[in-house]
Image (cartoon, rainbow, N blue to C red):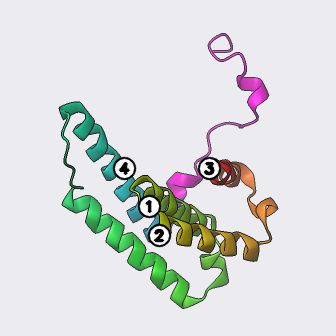
Amino acid sequence: MKYMFPLGEYIGFEGKDRTAFELLASDASFLHVTAFLAGAFIDIALRQQTDQRTHTTHHDSINHFLKGVRLLREKFLRRNEEETLSDATVSVVLTLAICAYGTGEYDTGRRHLEGLHQIVKLRGGLPSLKGQFGKKLLMEMLR
């Protein structure tokens, strides 16, 4: 294995991080937004394979998107700091921002990023993104 990935020991990600799988089981908004993202990706991949010029997102993907956003909104309304400032919430808002920019909804994407900035600021800034999953979130934010 060392010969296949010679730089692996220098990159700095230790082992497999199971945080995302745990969040799928413990945070419903994370689950639904992740399901939406997977469905949208599959829709785009299939569209490219068939060279379709028009695109509609599958109905199930839209339902996951709507449910994920509703659950996120409910989470914010509960004003539970632990829930609101969690890695799952950061990931959901970041995913929504990326999706908005990817579909040309630049104002919506900017609003998501402004909200993400507030969440990270309330957490204590970028150093609050700890552990492997936090590092991955940070890398995705800086991309």
Name the residue located 47 percent from the left edge and 57 percent from the top edge.
101
Rounded to the nearest angstrom, the CA distance separating label 2 from label 4 is 20 Å
Under mark 2, the amino acid is Thr
Q: Is residue 121 visible?
A: yes
Rounded to the nearest angstrom, the CA distance separating label 3 from label 2 is 18 Å
Tell me if mark 4 has few (under 14), some (14-19) or many (20+) residues whose alpha carbon lies within 10 angstroms of its own.
few
- In the image, which is nearer the foreground, mark 1 or mark 4? 1
Circles 1 and 4: CB atoms closer than 8 Å:
no
Under mark 4, the amino acid is Ala
Circle 3 sits on which residue?
Answer: 140
Circle 2 sits on which residue?
Answer: 108
Relative to 109, say whether 143 is above or below.
above
Circle 1 sits on which residue?
Answer: 100
Relative to 120, say whether 2 is above or below.
above
- In the image, which is nearer the foreground, mark 4 or mark 3? 3
Rounded to the nearest angstrom, the CA distance separating label 4 from label 3 is 17 Å
Rounded to the nearest angstrom, the CA distance separating label 1 from label 2 is 6 Å
Name the residue located 53 percent from the left edge and 57 percent from the top edge.
22
Q: Which residues are magenta?
A: 1-22
Residue 77 on the magenta segment: no
Q: Position of residue 6 (x, y in %)?
A: 71, 15
Circle 4 sits on which residue?
Answer: 38
Q: Mark 3 or mark 1, which has the lower sequence index?
A: 1
- In the image, which is nearer the foreground, mark 3 or mark 1? 1
Q: Mark 1 or mark 2, which has the lower sequence index?
A: 1
Name the residue located 47 percent from the left edge and 81 percent from the top edge.
73
